[in-house]
Image: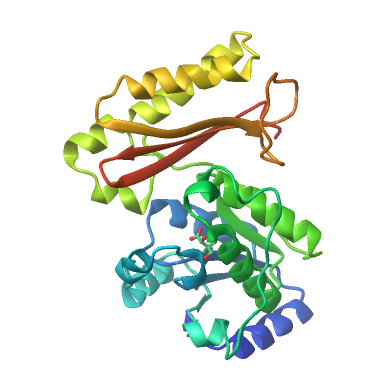
Amino acid sequence: MEIINRKQRIASLTRKLRRENKTIGFVPTMGALHEGHLSLVKEARQMCDVVIVSIFVNPTQFNDKTDLDKYPRDLAGDAALLAEFQVDYVFAPDEREIYGENFSTFVYVENLTETLEGASRPGHFRGVATVVTILFNTIRPDFAFFGQKDAQQVAVIKRLTKDLGFDTEIVVHPIVREESGLAMSSRNARLSEEERAKASIIYKALRETKIAFRNGERNASKLAEIVRQMVESEPLAMLDYVAVVDNETLENVEKIDDTEVLVAVAVNFGKIRLIDNIILNKKQ
Ligand code: PAF
């Protein structure tokens, strides 16, 4: 496995791989790798000839400087883990390599980025869309792998891939869960033992919604109410939002027909904000 820091070097390498008709799988990350990331790497390894993982803590997607400063960084540890999973290249640029002098071009995906997570993290998706555009443009992968846990990010990336004409297929990997059902996230480690156990209420509530849907409930507000009531029954949980939206446009849905619908939820446990979701009417 080789660690590459320069855009020019990874671009010329992937150009060569394309000429050799090798399929390139790309997993963008900010490091601090956990099971969720590794499941993406495993899928990339199965599907593609060459696997590239990027590790870049992207400053433009943080709206809080303290969060950015506190973000865990352990390139050596992450790289050792990726070597075990037969990754071919790690792209680990520094900030100046991605955002050169006088950088002033940003990618803003309209309509999808101001609600849900975007409402409490202004500018976050502009940062994500910008860095992913730069990475796609540099690497030009055949497949890029993202986790379903960040459902809004998935919608944004799919939109920009289509709109900007990238020849990259977006592969979305299902949410990886702890035994209790809690969606895996690097934030879980910051929960107390009690909070972590109680946080399983989030997935229980989403599952209850799915059962109601299977039993014929099509009214979005009623489905959202199931989540709200269950989450609010847990004293340690502070519900931020529960939304029932179209899985592609993220527009609110009132009555569910046969299109894919996302039930997305954000809940605070103390200072830790957790997100989770399920898709109703999921197409294969
Ligand atoms: O999901 C993430 O870790 C980041 O948002 C991404 C896609 C690597 C962009 O910085």
In this image, 2 relative to 103: left or right?
A: left
Q: Residue at x 23, y 36 (%)?
A: 195
The one of 6 and 79 positioned closer to us in this rendering: 6
Structure colour scheme: rainbow
Query: What percent of the width, then of the height, locates residue 183?
Result: 40, 40
In this image, 174 relative to 194: left or right?
A: right
Say whether residue 50 is visible. no
Q: Quadrant of the C terminus?
A: top right
The image shows a total of numbered marks equal to: 0
User: Is residue 98 placed above or below 35 in the rendered structure?
Assistant: below
Q: Residue furthest left?
A: 193
Query: What percent of the width, then of the height, locates residue 196?
Result: 25, 38
Q: Residue at x 61, y 84 (%)?
A: 103
Query: What percent of the width, then of the height, locates residue 233?
Result: 31, 19
User: Is residue 59 placed above or below 178 in the rendered structure?
Assistant: below
Query: What percent of the width, then of the height, locates residue 133?
Result: 67, 69
The one of 44 and 239 positioned closer to us in this rendering: 239
The one of 123 and 58 positioned closer to us in this rendering: 123
Q: Residue at x 47, y 17 (%)?
A: 226
The one of 275 and 107 positioned closer to us in this rendering: 107
User: Is residue 177 placed above or below 100 in the rendered structure?
Assistant: above
Name which quarter of the figure residue 128 lies in: bottom right
In this image, 175 relative to 271: left or right?
A: right
Q: Residue furthest top?
A: 215
Q: Residue at x 62, y 51 (%)?
A: 113
Say whether residue 20 is visible. yes
